[in-house]
Every structure is written in C-alpha cells, then in structure tokens.
Amino acid sequence: MDKLREHIITQRPILDVMNKFVFFANAKVAQKSIAWGVVKKRCIMKNHGRRNYRKFLNTRDFNNMFKFTIVRNPFDRVVSAFHYLQEHHPETISADENFVDFIKTRFSKYGVEIDRHFHHQYPNIIFNGNIFVDYIGRFENLKDDWKTIASKIDCSQELPHINKSKHEPYQTYYDDKECFEIVSSVYKKDIELLEYSYE
C-alpha cells in the first residue's frame, strides 16, 4: 500500500474535505465542470497551497474514500486540448498553428510533455498492473456516469459544462494518416486499457 499511496500522491488528485472522494482528474475531461462547478466548496486542490495540500494528502485514508476518474477518447481529447490551448494559452500553441502540422512536428517530437493537457490518462487508473480506482466514468456517457458518481459522494446530479472548447467533431481532424498514427502511438496504452477506438 505504501507504493500505491505514493503513486496516488504523485498524481495530485482532488480531495474532499468531507473525506468522501478522491477525484483523479484528467485535463479536458470535465475536470473544471466537477471541481469548479459542483463540488467547489468541498475541494482540496494542489493550487490551495503546496504545504496545505500535501498535509491533506498525507493524512487521508484512501481506502475509505470513493476513488474515481473520468476518461475520454484520446483522439477526441487531443483535439479538444489543442483548441483549448490555442485559445487560452497561445504561448503554447499559437492561433495560426494547424492541428495536423502540430501533431506531425512538435507533438511527434515531444509527445505528452508539451503540456499537462496532453498527459496520459492511465496513471490515474492503474498501478503495477492493477486498477486502483473504484469507478471509471466516461466523457462520452458523462450525464449517466455522473449520476452514479454523484450518488456515491452526496452531491448534485446536475453537471454544468464549463470550459468547453470550440471545434468540429474530432474525426474531421484525422484525414492525414501520419497524424492518426502518431496519436495512436502516443496514446497506445490509454487506447488499449480504456478500450477506445477511432470511430
């Protein structure tokens, strides 16, 4: 449990002051809708101060807390992250940068380390080959899955959509075979573990 506990701490999850949940958030997968929209007053997050957050992490009994995450199809998530960063963080992705060019040049070279919005999802789910969360919700079925989560953590079943990125359906961005293969390769473990496919 010590190694698993350290892994959990490394993932910097969102904690609950009422000790009901541990939320392993993935960027561009309803993170702000949940943490800022529904359970904001209950959340303990890394931006609440490093020392205070670490103290809360170190004193929590994770065994008795509902551990959950929300995942998203990696092909869709990359498109969403690209457009979000383009709009809100042009120092990372400029407004005139093309998605396919970005994937084939910088993303193919640096992968998920370009920005946390591209990080893999599997570390929030699996450790030493074992799933350590109690529930994996899916962005594609968020309305129903959130009701299941909400009933476990005693909060509103109404989930607002905060920070929505503006873009076309993700399938329209993968006409280029090389672009598709790069994303498939970078997110191979996410795709296999979460049983996603390009649809």
Image (tube, rainbow, N blue to C red):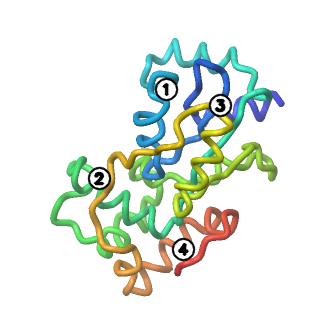
Q: Secondary structure at mark 2?
A: helix
Report the Cα–Cα distance between label 2 and label 3.
29 Å
Q: Is residue 99 left or right of residue 177?
A: left
> Quarter of the image containing the N terminus?
top right
Q: Which residue is mark 4?
A: 184
Image coordinates for residue 20, horizontal then vertical, percent: 67, 26
Report the Cα–Cα distance between label 3 and label 1.
13 Å
Which residue occupies 45% across, 67% down?
76
Q: Which residue is mark 2?
A: 85
Report the Cα–Cα distance between label 1 and label 2.
21 Å
Report the Cα–Cα distance between label 1 and label 4.
31 Å
Report the Cα–Cα distance between label 3 and label 4.
32 Å
Taking 161 as reference, is 155 above or below it?
above
Instruction: Please tell me how crowded label 1 is: few (under 14), some (14-19), or many (20+) other residues with Cα within 10 Å.
Output: many
Q: Secondary structure at mark 3?
A: strand
Image depth: mark 1 or mark 4 in front: 1
The amino acid type of the residue labelled 1 equals Met
Sequence-wise first label, 1 or 2: 1
Q: Secondary structure at mark 4?
A: helix
